Amino acid sequence: MLPLPYRKLGKSRLSICLLGIGTTWFGRPWPPENHSYSYPSSEEIDDYLHEIFVKIKETKALLMIDTAASYGQSEKIIGEYFRKNKKLLLKTFIATKWGEEFDIAKHASTLNHSKEHLLASVKRSLSYLGKIDLLYIHRASRDVLLDQDVIAEMKQLKKRHFGHIRCIGASFSSECTLEEAVKENLTGWADAIQMPACIFLKRPDLIHMIREKGISIVLNSVVRRGGNLPPEKLYSALLPHDEISVILTGTRYHLSETIGYFFKSK
């Protein structure tokens, strides 16, 4: 079996699989409008992750598993999996996010970008996951990026927890907010920026500015926000771009098919 393609992750220079795994559906209803959602069993999660690790066996790179405090039980579920499969954790690059919380009972999200919440969220995430290789500000806003106390604390967390928190960054869902942040140079401290794939394809001007800073680009929502194009065409449009470090797949039911697109890119 051919190894999956991989890229270097920005300033860290770590080798990371171009394919990354999004885990929102592990721990909360996803997509939000999916009224038929049912929570996955531990067996489904085990089978899903086992399939991935079998496919990357020959790949000399780490697999990014992307989660967040706002993904319901996702962090807890991932931590439980790796407590049962400790050797696989060595092949994994875990990214998580702070700043958004999800109330499972109310099915509602709230934002809290305070320094106090940052510290509490990281403490909880580390207790579940054991390590954080990449810590993002979730749904980053101009206000939090201008908050010098928060940004300084992000840098200190990386410095204090080296080996647990290797990289820091910001995750954006809005094109306008990303444009403000890049043009006002509010993300120069970041190792990585996460954004929807549709913004990457639409805004090569912003991508050029981000890459000039040596910041890695991680993409999400390839299919969910990809309009009417079929998945194969969407991945074909993205995979040739060397500016991309990781493309996250959040699929629950089409994993083998999606992995196949990455093998075709070689």
Image (cartoon, rainbow, N blue to C red):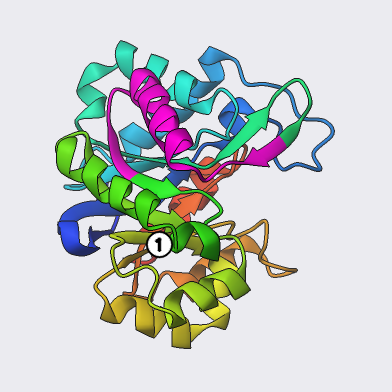
Apparent side of residue 86 relative to residue 204 in the rendered image (left or right): left
Residue at 48% across, 34% down: 117
**Quadrant position of the C terminus in the picture:** bottom left
In the rendered image, residue 150, in percent from the top left (x then y), is placed at 39, 49
Would you identify the image quadrant in which residue 127 lies? top left
Q: Nearer the viewer, residue 71 or 159?
A: 159
115 to 244, vertically: above or below: above
In the rendered image, residue 21, in percent from the top left (x then y), is placed at 45, 43
Would you identify the image quadrant in which residue 62 lies? top left
Q: For mark 1, what is the residue?
A: 193
Apparent side of residue 10 relative to residue 112 in the rendered image (left or right): left
- Residue 94 in magenta stretch: no
Q: Can residue 200 be seen in this view?
A: no
In the rendered image, residue 189, in percent from the top left (x then y), is placed at 28, 63
Residue at 40% across, 62% down: 193
The amino acid at mark 1 is Ile
Which residues are drawn in magenta?
109-134
In the rendered image, residue 77, in percent from the top left (x then y), is placed at 48, 20
Q: Is residue 68 visible?
A: yes
64 to 200, vertically: above or below: above
Q: Nearer the viewer, residue 26 or 60?
A: 26
Give the secondary structure at mark 1: strand
